[in-house]
Amino acid sequence: MDTCKLSPLPSNSIFVEFAGHAAFFGSVNYERKIFNIKSFYLTGRAGVGYGRFFGYSILSVPVIITGVLRVFRKISYEIGAGVSLMRIGNLSSQSGSNWSYKNDIAPTALIGIRVQSKSGFLFRADFTPIYTNFNNDDTQKNLYPFFGISLGYGFGVK
Protein backbone atom coordinates (compact mmCIF):
# COMPACT_ATOMS: atom_id res chain seq x y z
CA MET A 1 0.00 0.00 0.00
CA ASP A 2 1.33 3.44 -0.96
CA THR A 3 0.96 5.73 2.07
CA CYS A 4 2.01 8.84 0.08
CA LYS A 5 -0.65 8.56 -2.64
CA LEU A 6 -1.44 12.06 -3.87
CA SER A 7 -5.10 12.98 -3.83
CA PRO A 8 -6.42 15.35 -6.50
CA LEU A 9 -6.19 19.06 -5.78
CA PRO A 10 -8.80 21.71 -6.61
CA SER A 11 -8.89 22.89 -10.25
CA ASN A 12 -9.66 26.53 -9.32
CA SER A 13 -8.35 28.83 -6.62
CA ILE A 14 -9.17 32.32 -5.42
CA PHE A 15 -6.60 33.98 -3.18
CA VAL A 16 -5.27 37.22 -1.81
CA GLU A 17 -1.56 37.80 -2.34
CA PHE A 18 0.04 40.26 0.08
CA ALA A 19 2.80 42.27 -1.67
CA GLY A 20 4.12 39.96 -4.42
CA HIS A 21 3.32 40.70 -8.07
CA ALA A 22 1.32 43.84 -7.31
CA ALA A 23 4.43 45.47 -5.80
CA PHE A 24 3.81 47.06 -2.40
CA PHE A 25 0.13 46.37 -1.93
CA GLY A 26 -1.09 42.94 -2.90
CA SER A 27 -3.75 41.58 -5.22
CA VAL A 28 -6.87 39.44 -5.47
CA ASN A 29 -6.33 36.53 -7.89
CA TYR A 30 -8.11 33.72 -9.72
CA GLU A 31 -6.05 30.66 -10.72
CA ARG A 32 -7.06 27.70 -12.88
CA LYS A 33 -5.30 24.39 -13.38
CA ILE A 34 -4.58 24.06 -17.13
CA PHE A 35 -3.37 20.44 -17.12
CA ASN A 36 -1.67 17.93 -14.88
CA ILE A 37 0.48 14.84 -15.23
CA LYS A 38 0.84 12.80 -12.03
CA SER A 39 2.51 15.13 -9.50
CA PHE A 40 3.10 18.08 -11.88
CA TYR A 41 0.52 20.57 -13.02
CA LEU A 42 0.45 23.87 -14.88
CA THR A 43 -1.74 26.79 -13.81
CA GLY A 44 -2.71 30.14 -15.26
CA ARG A 45 -3.69 33.06 -13.10
CA ALA A 46 -4.83 36.66 -13.33
CA GLY A 47 -5.46 39.20 -10.62
CA VAL A 48 -5.84 42.85 -9.81
CA GLY A 49 -4.28 45.02 -7.13
CA TYR A 50 -4.30 48.71 -6.28
CA GLY A 51 -2.83 50.96 -3.63
CA ARG A 52 -1.11 54.22 -2.75
CA PHE A 53 2.14 54.24 -0.84
CA PHE A 54 4.86 56.88 -0.29
CA GLY A 55 3.81 59.08 -3.21
CA TYR A 56 3.10 56.17 -5.60
CA SER A 57 -0.26 55.02 -6.94
CA ILE A 58 -0.13 51.58 -8.55
CA LEU A 59 -2.82 49.63 -10.37
CA SER A 60 -1.47 46.19 -11.22
CA VAL A 61 -2.89 43.25 -13.20
CA PRO A 62 -0.59 40.21 -12.81
CA VAL A 63 -0.96 37.47 -15.47
CA ILE A 64 1.21 34.44 -14.72
CA ILE A 65 1.78 30.81 -15.81
CA THR A 66 3.06 28.57 -13.01
CA GLY A 67 4.44 25.05 -12.92
CA VAL A 68 3.65 23.23 -9.67
CA LEU A 69 5.48 20.08 -8.55
CA ARG A 70 3.88 18.23 -5.65
CA VAL A 71 6.52 16.75 -3.39
CA PHE A 72 4.45 15.49 -0.46
CA ARG A 73 0.66 15.35 -0.04
CA LYS A 74 -0.23 19.05 0.44
CA ILE A 75 3.24 20.53 -0.17
CA SER A 76 4.45 21.65 -3.60
CA TYR A 77 7.22 23.69 -5.14
CA GLU A 78 6.21 26.26 -7.73
CA ILE A 79 8.02 28.26 -10.38
CA GLY A 80 6.48 30.60 -12.90
CA ALA A 81 6.74 33.64 -15.13
CA GLY A 82 4.48 36.29 -16.58
CA VAL A 83 3.82 39.99 -16.69
CA SER A 84 2.29 42.54 -14.41
CA LEU A 85 0.38 45.15 -16.40
CA MET A 86 0.90 48.33 -14.38
CA ARG A 87 -0.44 51.87 -14.26
CA ILE A 88 2.04 53.77 -12.08
CA GLY A 89 1.37 57.23 -10.73
CA ASN A 90 3.88 59.52 -9.03
CA LEU A 91 2.90 62.42 -6.83
CA SER A 92 4.67 65.62 -7.89
CA SER A 93 7.08 66.64 -5.14
CA GLN A 94 6.74 70.32 -6.01
CA SER A 95 3.01 70.85 -5.58
CA GLY A 96 2.10 67.73 -3.62
CA SER A 97 -1.24 67.43 -5.44
CA ASN A 98 -0.43 66.73 -9.11
CA TRP A 99 -0.14 63.12 -10.23
CA SER A 100 1.69 61.96 -13.36
CA TYR A 101 1.04 58.49 -14.75
CA LYS A 102 2.68 55.93 -17.02
CA ASN A 103 1.79 52.43 -18.18
CA ASP A 104 4.23 49.53 -18.00
CA ILE A 105 4.34 45.86 -18.93
CA ALA A 106 6.62 44.56 -16.19
CA PRO A 107 8.09 41.05 -16.57
CA THR A 108 7.81 39.09 -13.35
CA ALA A 109 8.58 35.62 -12.03
CA LEU A 110 8.00 33.49 -8.97
CA ILE A 111 9.64 30.67 -7.11
CA GLY A 112 8.37 29.33 -3.83
CA ILE A 113 6.36 26.84 -1.85
CA ARG A 114 2.64 26.08 -1.88
CA VAL A 115 0.51 24.26 0.67
CA GLN A 116 -2.88 23.27 -0.73
CA SER A 117 -5.32 20.71 0.60
CA LYS A 118 -8.09 18.83 -1.16
CA SER A 119 -10.55 20.55 1.21
CA GLY A 120 -9.63 23.94 -0.27
CA PHE A 121 -7.14 25.68 2.03
CA LEU A 122 -4.33 27.44 0.09
CA PHE A 123 -1.13 29.03 1.43
CA ARG A 124 1.75 30.25 -0.75
CA ALA A 125 5.09 31.92 0.06
CA ASP A 126 7.03 33.12 -2.99
CA PHE A 127 9.95 35.22 -4.15
CA THR A 128 8.37 37.48 -6.81
CA PRO A 129 10.87 39.76 -8.56
CA ILE A 130 9.49 42.49 -10.87
CA TYR A 131 11.46 44.27 -13.61
CA THR A 132 10.11 47.83 -13.91
CA ASN A 133 10.73 51.53 -13.34
CA PHE A 134 8.45 53.10 -10.74
CA ASN A 135 9.43 56.63 -11.77
CA ASN A 136 7.58 58.33 -14.61
CA ASP A 137 10.68 59.08 -16.62
CA ASP A 138 11.82 56.56 -19.18
CA THR A 139 15.11 55.76 -17.50
CA GLN A 140 16.47 52.27 -17.09
CA LYS A 141 14.27 49.63 -15.48
CA ASN A 142 15.40 47.87 -12.32
CA LEU A 143 14.82 44.43 -10.84
CA TYR A 144 12.86 44.76 -7.59
CA PRO A 145 13.13 41.68 -5.31
CA PHE A 146 9.60 41.43 -3.86
CA PHE A 147 8.13 38.59 -1.79
CA GLY A 148 4.53 37.50 -1.56
CA ILE A 149 2.37 35.59 0.91
CA SER A 150 -0.97 34.23 -0.31
CA LEU A 151 -4.02 32.89 1.49
CA GLY A 152 -7.01 31.51 -0.32
CA TYR A 153 -9.46 28.77 -1.14
CA GLY A 154 -9.47 26.10 -3.85
CA PHE A 155 -12.59 24.54 -5.33
CA GLY A 156 -13.63 22.15 -8.09
CA VAL A 157 -11.82 18.91 -7.18
CA LYS A 158 -11.99 16.39 -10.03
Image (cartoon, rainbow, N blue to C red):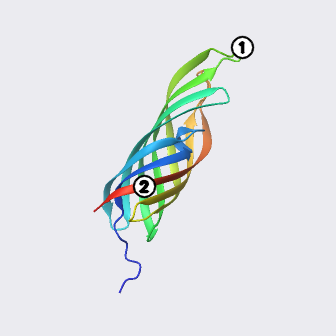
- Identify the residue shown where x is 46% and y is 69%: 71
How far apart marks 1 and 2 lie (CA) works out to 45 Å
Q: Is residue 156 above or below residue 147?
A: below
Helix or strand or loop: what does disc 2 sit on?
Answer: strand
Name the amino acid type tagged 1.
Answer: Gln
Judge whether 47 appears above or below 141 on screen: below
Residue at 51% x, 56% y is 124
Coordinates of residue 73 in the picture (x, y in percent):
43, 71
Q: Quadrant of the C terminus?
A: bottom left
- Residue 82: which quarter of the image? top left
Foreground mark, 1 or 2?
Answer: 2
Mark 1 in CB contact with mark 2 (< 8 angstroms): no
Which residue extends farthest bottom?
A: 1
Does residue 107 sit above or below 38 in this rendering? above
Which residue is most to the left?
158
Look at the numbered disc 1 and give the secondary structure of its residue: loop
The crowd level at tag 2 (other Cα within 10 Å; few <14, some 14-19, many 20+) is some
Q: Which residue is mark 2?
A: 153
Name the quadrant of the N terminus.
Answer: bottom left
Q: Is residue 9 left or right of residue 55?
A: left
Of 134 and 55, nearer the camera is 55
Q: Which residue is mark 1?
A: 94
Among the two numbered marks 1 and 2 on one chain, the one whose residue lies closer to the N terminus: 1
Q: Amino acid at mark 2?
A: Tyr
- Give coordinates of residue 43: x percent, y percent: 37, 52
In the rendered image, residue 118, in percent from the top left (x then y), is placed at 38, 65
Would you place residue 73 above or below residue 106 in this image?
A: below
Q: Residue at x 54, y 41 (%)?
A: 26
In the image, taking residue 128 as reference, residue 4 lies left or right, namely: left
> Residue 56 has which mark?
none
